[in-house]
Image (tube, grey):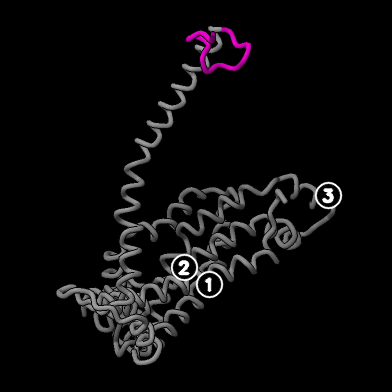
């Protein structure tokens, strides 16, 4: 008859080994339970504030819902309206794409150049790293108010300096012609030296020095080393910054909402701003949810295209 001490133990195990195995099993169970306990706040938050609203917005996108009444099922009517009868959808998408096309390549190239310069270990490098990173730390509201004052057509210092040369300064954000270029310039100011630059700097510092030493022995010039060593080694970093840059640029909202309200004459009426207006100002929550899902699917498509095309130019050292 099997004794109680050795019950559940492997054949031939001693009583001491069996007891040790049971204690280890209980310890593992306790660790797993405490792991789930510590994980539960995050899981509850994910369900309540991410997955829940996500699924609710998907359901509401197929309904006519204005908060005050009950949702009324309309099927694909909201999506059809977005692509056929809403006169602001396609122009807002066009402005958003123009903004992204102007911002992403310029900010990507500028951040890489700044990172290369700050990776030279020259005197005062720490100061300049802080200086270039500071614009990204300025709160959006404070930044918008600051730029409203700087670019004020009558009282702003920029137009005052321009007028000293006998030139009439533009209207900047109060001009339908200049509003979008102004928002692009402000976006570049906040993105050139921010997180993108820090990520590039980390990627540059991760390039093995042995590769540069080998290229020096082969007589490679600085441009050759940058082209054949630096760029391939930091290509995963470039892909990461590119994806984040495209997503961030297509989500442009803050500066247009605070500084221009989408104007003048819809000159800065971006797609994210259009979603906000429909959902939270006009209380068309069903239609706003449909626009948000169109936007989310568009971001997924752009991200997928970038990932698929990256196999041609991204080099991974471990492969």
Magenta region: which residues? 1-14
Q: Is residue 3 magenta?
A: yes
Residue 63 highlighted magenta (yes or no): no
In this view of the protein, which residue sits in the foreground, 13 or 49? 13
SS assignment at label 1: helix
Q: Which residue is under mark 1?
A: 302
Q: Which residue is mark 2?
A: 247
Residue drawn at x 58%, y 62% is 113
User: Residue pushed farthest left?
Assistant: 68
Inter-mark Cα distance, 3 to 2 = 42 Å
Quadrant in which residue 236 is drawn: bottom right
Tag 3 residue:
217
Q: Residue at x 32, y 68 (%)?
A: 57
User: Does 37 appear above or below 189?
Assistant: above
Q: Position of residue 215 (x, y in %)?
A: 79, 52
What x and y, as percent, mark residue 248?
44, 67
For residue 162, say whether it is visible.
no
């Amino acid at each position: 008859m099997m004794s109680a001490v050795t019950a559940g133990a492997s054949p031939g195990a001693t009583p001491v080994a069996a007891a040790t195995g049971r204690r280890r099993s209980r310890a593992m169970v306790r660790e797993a339970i405490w792991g789930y306990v510590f994980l539960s706040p995050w899981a509850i938050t994910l369900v309540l504030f991410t997955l829940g609203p996500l699924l609710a917005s998907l359901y509401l996108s197929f309904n006519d819902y204005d908060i005050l009444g009950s949702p009324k099922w309309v099927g694909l009517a909201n999506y059809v309206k977005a692509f056929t009868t809403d006169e602001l959808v396609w122009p807002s998408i066009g402005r958003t794409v123009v903004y992204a096309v102007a911002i992403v390549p310029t900010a990507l190239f500028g951040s890489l150049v700044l990172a290369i310069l700050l990776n030279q270990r020259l005197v005062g490098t720490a100061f300049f790293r802080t200086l270039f990173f500071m614009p990204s730390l300025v709160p959006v509201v404070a930044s918008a108010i600051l730029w409203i004052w700087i670019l004020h057509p009558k009282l702003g210092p920029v137009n005052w300096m321009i007028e000293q040369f006998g030139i009439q300064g533009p209207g900047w954000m109060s001009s339908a012609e200049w509003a979008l270029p102004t928002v692009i310039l402000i976006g570049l100011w906040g993105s050139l030296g921010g997180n993108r630059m820090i990520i590039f700097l980390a990627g540059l510092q991760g390039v093995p020095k042995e590769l540069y030493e080998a290229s020096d022995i082969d007589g490679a010039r600085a441009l050759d080393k940058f082209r054949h060593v630096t760029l391939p080694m930091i290509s995963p970093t470039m892909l990461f910054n590119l994806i984040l840059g495209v997503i961030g640029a297509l989500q442009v909202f803050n500066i247009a909402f605070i500084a221009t309200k989408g104007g003048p004459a819809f000159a800065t009426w971006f797609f994210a701003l259009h979603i906000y207006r429909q959902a939270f100002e006009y209380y068309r929550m069903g239609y706003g949810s449909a626009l948000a899902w169109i936007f989310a699917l568009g971001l997924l498509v752009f991200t997928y295209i970038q990932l698929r095309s990256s196999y041609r130019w991204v080099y991974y050292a471990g492969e």
